[in-house]
Amino acid sequence: MMRRLIHQIKNFLFPPYQDISDEYINRLFCANAGMLHRGNLLAFDYAIRHLPQDSVVVEVGSYAGLSTNAIIYYLQKHGKTTLSLPVIPGSILGKKMPGPLQKTI
């Protein structure tokens, strides 16, 4: 009874996710810094699969390019001729970002 309750609480707080990583994505996670949860890959794949051709994808707040590279990979995988634009919010406003992103584009 107690184990079942603990399991239900764990699944409520940390729901399981479907990891659709393939060899390229696994290597990308090793080679590219960034903050991307593997559970988001299914959402990327679904959204890009259903994206109209010749659309524009804008990623706001690219940290180190991991999610940008994953998005570009799924665009190529699904044969989309889509423009992908990673944007750092400070570069839009003309302000310098703190930390490693101190340059303004």
Image (cartoon, rainbow, N blue to C red):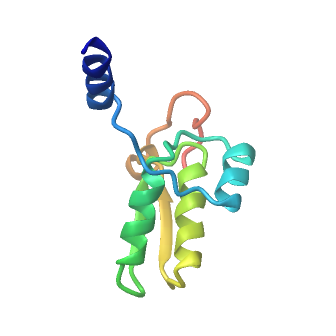
In front: 83, or 37? 37
Query: Going 50% across and 48% down the picture, which residue do you hit?
Result: 62
In the rendered view, would you say 72 is above or below 66? below
In the rendered view, would you say 78 is above or below 9? below
- Quarter of the image where the N terminus is located: top left
Q: Quadrant of residue 25?
A: bottom right
Query: Going 27% across and 12% down the picture, which residue do you hit?
Result: 2
Q: Position of residue 48 (x, y in %)?
A: 42, 72
Q: Quadrant of residue 77?
A: bottom right
Query: Going 41% across and 64% down the picture, which residue do you hit?
Result: 58
Q: Position of residue 98 (x, y in %)?
A: 52, 29
Q: Position of residue 95 (x, y in %)?
A: 44, 40
In front: 91, or 39? 39
Outermost residue, top side: 2
Query: Going 52% across and 63% down the picture, which residue do you hit?
Result: 71
Outermost residue, front side: 1
Horizontal side of 88 relative to 77 (left or right) equals left
Q: Position of residue 36 (x, y in %)?
A: 51, 44
Number of labels in the image equals 0
